[in-house]
Image (cartoon, helix red, strand yellow):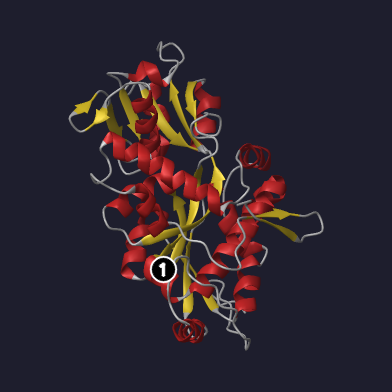
Amino acid sequence: MKKLTKLAALAAAATLTIGFFSGCGDDASDSNNAAESSSDYVFKIGTANSSLCLAPLHVAEDLGYFADEFEAAGISYELVEIDMTQAADLIVSGKIDACVGLAGSLIPQIDSGLEIVFSAGLHTGCTKYYAKEDSGITSVADLKGKTIGVPGMADSSVTAIKRKLYDVGIGVSTDNMEVDFVVYNSTDLPLALENGAVDAIAVHDPVASEAEAEYGFTKILDLTEDEKFSNEYCCTTFISTSMAETYPEASAAYTRALMKASAYVQANPEEAAQLQIDNEQCSGDLETNSALLASYNYQPSVSAIKTTFQNACSDLLEIGDLQEGRDIDEFTEGHVVSYDGVPDSYIYNEDGTFTEVEVDT
């Protein structure tokens, strides 16, 4: 059933299948209590329009994957319209229980105490870096001493470029910063570069691709294509730690729905783009949007987000942007979860069914 404000699946009378939170040592009675409480709780999922990269979130709503998964589990849920830039704060305040976001933005917040866990990677790519064509800057190695315009200091684009700058020997630590970061509104970044206010910019699609086409900027780094980042997942599902532990069935249903939606986007980028346009969830034209969706890897993965987390944290620890002495394996185990009943990935089949994919161990 739908609420007038947003989608909400009503609890169905059903026997719940327990999905144990990875690494938990709860006994059977604790699990049964969790199952019973799950049936009475409304699991709140943050959502928003306007972003192309949120295609799995939109598809999960539009094609009923949320409704199907939560109804099968006998659990209620609600989609809550939010400002995605405030998702972490809303998790902390309990206004939402889960959302999707950029791993590179969230990891430093987790290091500072944000209590969330990642449950699946949804797609790679979507962030690009540019310089003016006549600037002489053709690669990241040319950025020493330069000014880089970014959407925000906590943005995932900063995390990624710092990792890449460090790799090529350019200082990005507090006591050896060899570039300057300047914050601009995302849509103003292309103009800042064109006018010479900055030497390079970090931008997310679709602003990135639109700017490249309009101004003819030189692309110096594309996370979709770069060897370091091409297999890392930028967008991930995340859940409040307390909710993930207390309501594992709801958390698993949420994760399955978004993984299936992501697999659908991987197989049907044009159809996904059309859904977003038809439902006013994203602006733009069909040809451009579908081409961008097709350019990313939307094959969802639980194991890949774990690898992404480990890679990013290892780099940030070496740079000095993670708490000194962090045990990366322990940190990863505490913030990347897996559930019984959630495979490593899904493949969307032409008949509308899904094939579960498991990682060989």
Does residue 39 appear left or right of residue 134 in this picture?
right
User: Which amino acid lies under the numbered mark 1 shown in the image of this protein?
Assistant: Ile
The residue that appears at 49% across and 81% down in the rendered structure is: 38
**Which quarter of the figure has residue 297?**
top right
Coordinates of residue 202 in the picture (x, y in percent): 41, 32
When the figure is inspected, residue 162 is found, relative to residue 297, above or below; the finding is above
For the residue pair 81 and 361, the one nearer the viewer reads as 361
For the residue pair 318 and 107, the one nearer the viewer reads as 318
Secondary structure beneath dot 1 equals loop
Coordinates of residue 41 in the picture (x, y in percent): 47, 81
The residue that appears at 52% across and 84% down in the rendered structure is: 39
Coordinates of residue 133 in the picture (x, y in percent): 46, 14
Does residue 48 appear left or right of residue 166 in this picture?
right
The residue that appears at 70% across and 53% down in the rendered structure is: 347
When the figure is inspected, residue 357 is found, relative to residue 31, above or below; the finding is above
Quadrant of the frame with the N terminus: bottom right
Q: Which residue is mark 1?
A: 96
Q: Residue furthest bottom?
A: 13
When the figure is inspected, residue 147 is found, relative to residue 239, above or below; the finding is above
**Which quarter of the figure has residue 322?**
top left
